[in-house]
Image (cartoon, grey):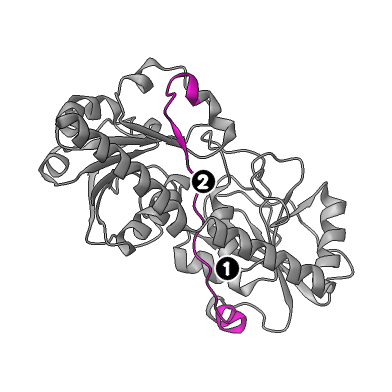
Amino acid sequence: MKIGMMSAWNTDSGVAIHAEAVGKAWRKMGHELTVFTFMKEDFHGEGFTGDDEDYVIRCIGTRKTNYLDPRPILAADFDIFVVQDLNMLPVESLAKIFPLIRKKAKTVHIVHENALPEEAWFYQFDWDGVVYFCHRQNSLGSVYPEAKRIHFPCFSLRKKDKMEARKKLGLPLDKKIIYEFCQRGYKPFLRNLPEELKKKAVLLVVIPLSCEFLEEDSPPSWMIIHREEALSHEKFDDYLFASDAVIFHKFQSRYHAVVSSTTFQALGTGCPILVPGQSDFFFPFKNEVVRYADIEDLRKTLVELMENGERYKALREKAEQFVKKNSAGRIAEEHIKLFNSLLKNSRERTF
């Protein structure tokens, strides 16, 4: 099958996480994929996470600039045309060439919004198929009764030696590392380690270059601060491989996302994940993550997790089971089944 996809790609956005997971899985399955994505001077996200593959074409801008070079899209050969996250794309320009796209391919919209948008332009496209992630998007059914629910994909299970990752990142080899992830919309929450951990652990705070953080002239011995640009996939993994636990202190997305795509990306590394219990952003996860009620509960949980080997092992096992159940390969296969049904229905109507 030949698939064209208009989406974020190789950027630090949840849309790119979904697109790359299923897109690369399609290629492993033997399908052809061409990705039409944002120009490097006009994209959705904070930075780039990798180099472009030879099947990636940068020919569009964001909805704000409405830039679109239609030539690569109209000249490409594909049976299915997938659009991810319409809200961020050059909608007005896409609408002008959409009839030509529909003449040669079936069109599928993968919806990333957590509610039906108010804007009328969102509904101007006559999609052959619509895909969503979870029950929170069920309102789509009132407009798209044939919409299909397909789970958000996990990045694969992967391993790396902890000491090797630490050496690469310049981190201590003889301490427990509690990693506070603060990229993009995340802000530091834990500012002080429990007394029980200060001699045997360090708090690693990784924040973007643009993030405000009240840094001391010389941080205490139990705190390490790293400032980073957008993390590449490799460096994203390395920080998790190097750590004994990671904190994702986030309550909601700035862009109306439905789920924590970062968690779907991180689970496969085996690093235990702690999230705020009051947040509804991590609702798909149950025993795969640890929830804390407040700062005091977080401190107690960290002490228990660092000392309780059985709880640590059980948490990793649950995360591994979740990743296998929602692997990119399995989720990609669900999309292919939908694509085949659309193509089959089209052929049947032809005769």
Residue 264 position, x and y percent, is 55, 54
For mark 2, does the 10 Å Cα neighbourhood hold few (<14), some (14 to 19), or many (20 or more) residues? some
- Pointer 1 local density, CA inside 10 Å: few below 14, some 14–19, many at least 20: many
Q: Answer above or below: position of 351 versus 40.
A: above
Would you say residue 307 sits in the magenta stretch?
Answer: no
First reached walking from the N terminus: tag 2 or tag 1 = 2
Tell me if residue 275 comes above or below residue 272 in the rendering. above
Residue 5, given in percent of the width and then of the height, sits at 29, 45
Q: Position of residue 191 (x, y in %)?
A: 76, 56
**On screen, 136 above or below 50?**
above
Identify the residue at image location x=53%, y=57%: 265
Name the residue rendered at 42%, 17% in the picture.
119
Name the residue rendered at 25%, 42% in the picture: 80
In the rendered structure, the answer to whether residue 84 lies left or right of residue 76 reads right
Q: CA distance from mark 2 to mark 1?
A: 20 Å
Q: Nearer the viewer, mark 2 or mark 1?
A: 2
The part of the chain drawn in magenta is 140-167
- Mark 1 element type: helix
Residue 157 lies in the magenta stretch: yes
Q: Which residue is mark 2?
A: 151
> For residue 329, what is the image quadrant?
bottom left
Is residue 263 in view from this perspective? Answer: yes
Q: Residue at x 26, y 57 (%)?
A: 31
Give the dominant element type of the magenta stretch: helix, strand or loop: loop
Horizontal side of residue 350 vs 215, given as left or right: left
